[in-house]
Image (cartoon, rainbow, N blue to C red):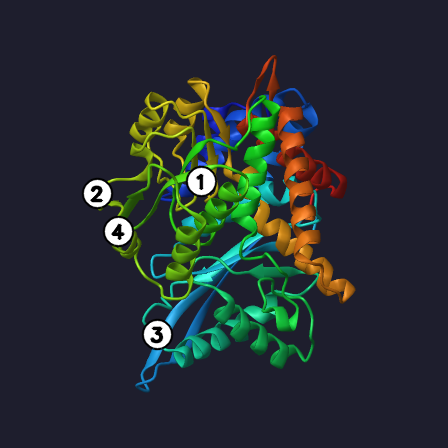
Amino acid sequence: MFSNQLDLDDFMHGLVKRNPNEPDFHQAVQEVAESVIPFINRHPKYVKERILERMTEPDRIILFRVCWEDDEGHIRVNRGCRVQFNNAIGPYKGGLRFSPTLTLDTLKFLGFEQTFKNSLTTLPLGAAKGGADFNPKGKSDREVMRFCQSFMTELHKHIGAHTDIPAGDIGVGSREISYMFGQYKRLENQFQGVLTGKGLEFGGSLIRKEATGYGTVFFTEELLKKHNQELAGKRCVVSGSGNVALYAAQKIMQQGGYVVALSDSSGSIHVPEGLSREQMDWLIDLKENRRGRINEFAEHFHCQFNPETSVWQYPCQAAFACATQNELQLEDAKTLIKNGCMVVAEGANMPATLEASHCLREAGVLFAPAKAANAGGVAVSGLEMSQNSMRLSWSIEELEDRLHTIMRKIHEQCVEHGREGDYIDYVKGANIAGFKKVANAMLAYGVV
């Protein structure tokens, strides 16, 4: 006999038992369950229909072999995967990641997060994530092409413009998307918007590359405005120097903030007076075109480079976590609080540990969770789908305006569901708002 109340510990015990040795997935679900289960218990229909249990189980997981030939004529074998997590509110949507360390645990955590993120955008998008244990670094263009063609030869059976629309992610940029799109078109004999992140010449969208970073800053501005603050004039640190970090930093500067630190896997740079426009442009060129390391920036501009120091050690008023998951640990959170940081925004996927998130929020730091602040990328992917369907292209100005509107609506949902008296818990707000839309759709379909 089922209880009419959900218990957090019992729920997590059951989830861990069903999904052993998947700590990232456990962490992602725990973060949602902590705030969603009290809401569920106030609405017995969700308990009765076991919505959270169903929502934490992917619709399907597709594993497949990818065989390809390297330039030396040797046969290579990799494993491809697509986790189609939930399509209650629209076709599956989410990135493809090529990384030698990719695991099913990572894909399940990302697909689960995507369910809530896509729901918050207000666009009709379901959630998925996929990729392969393939490392494009050090491979020739021809090797990457042969791998992508082999990968798509299997994946094409499971995707489509009204079924599942993958995008890029780590290790999958415009080159990889182009090769995969060409192979899909060849196999299906159709020119349709089945992938996003395409080249502008064949259906891509302007500002797709910048979208996640821009969206993170737009959301942070809305959060600050709600608390009678503004980004202009604030000293900001940004972790990472990939697309999200670079374009978050660029937008921070455009909005009047000072970017005083950035990083990559080799270390961090510190520019106490804030980067200039010239320095930002030079860094973007270094990272995007020359694939250089951030210490080259320090050497060129004679600024401080610290190989052992993260950006969290530098005094700031706003911190943007834009590098990778679990990069912001409990001790980092304590350092940020001690140094007077007032807002932390997650530009990457789950960059703060649960302990760090709890610590920051308990200290009164404004905390913008990834599923809200990081949604700009998938939002513009959704806009790319719309442009493909209508056979048109919007201008940069139109797209930025649409992106800003979407991030404003996400903020409004977080405020509506996260308000606790005078305090707004943005994690709770994002989780409940994202859950409610998907849950109500699942209820409407019956037991499927």
- Given residues 314 and 74, the one toward you in this image is 314
Tell me the number on the disc at residue 308. Answer: 2
Q: Amino acid at mark 2?
A: Glu
The CA span between labels 3 and 4 is 22 Å
Q: Amino acid at mark 4?
A: Ser
Q: Position of residue 200 (x, y in %)?
A: 62, 68
Q: Residues within 10 Å of mark 4 (few under 14, many from 20)?
A: some
Q: Position of residue 261 (x, y in %)?
A: 35, 41
Q: Position of residue 388 (x, y in %)?
A: 71, 64
* 3 or 4: tag closer to the N-terminus: 3
Which residue is drawn at the image coordinates 42% and 28% (left, top)? 317
Which residue is drawn at the image coordinates 43% and 57% (left, top)? 170
Q: Residues within 10 Å of mark 3 (few under 14, many from 20)?
A: few
Q: Would you name the residue on which mark 3 appears?
A: 139
* 3 or 1: tag closer to the N-terminus: 3
Do labels 3 and 4 touch, CB within 8 Å? no
Q: Quadrant of the N terminus?
A: top right
Do labels 3 and 1 touch, CB within 8 Å? no
Which residue is drawn at the image coordinates 34% and 57% (left, top)? 101
SS at mark 3 in the image? loop
The CA span between labels 3 and 1 is 29 Å
* 4 or 1: tag closer to the N-terminus: 4
Q: Position of residue 3 (x, y in %)?
A: 59, 23
The number of callouts visible is 4
Q: Would you name the residue on which mark 4 appears?
A: 266
Tell me the number on the disc at residue 405. Answer: none
Which residue is drawn at the image coordinates 39% and 46% (left, top)? 323
The CA span between labels 2 and 3 is 29 Å
Q: Would you name the residue on which mark 1 appears?
A: 350
The CA span between labels 1 and 2 is 22 Å
The CA span between labels 4 and 1 is 21 Å
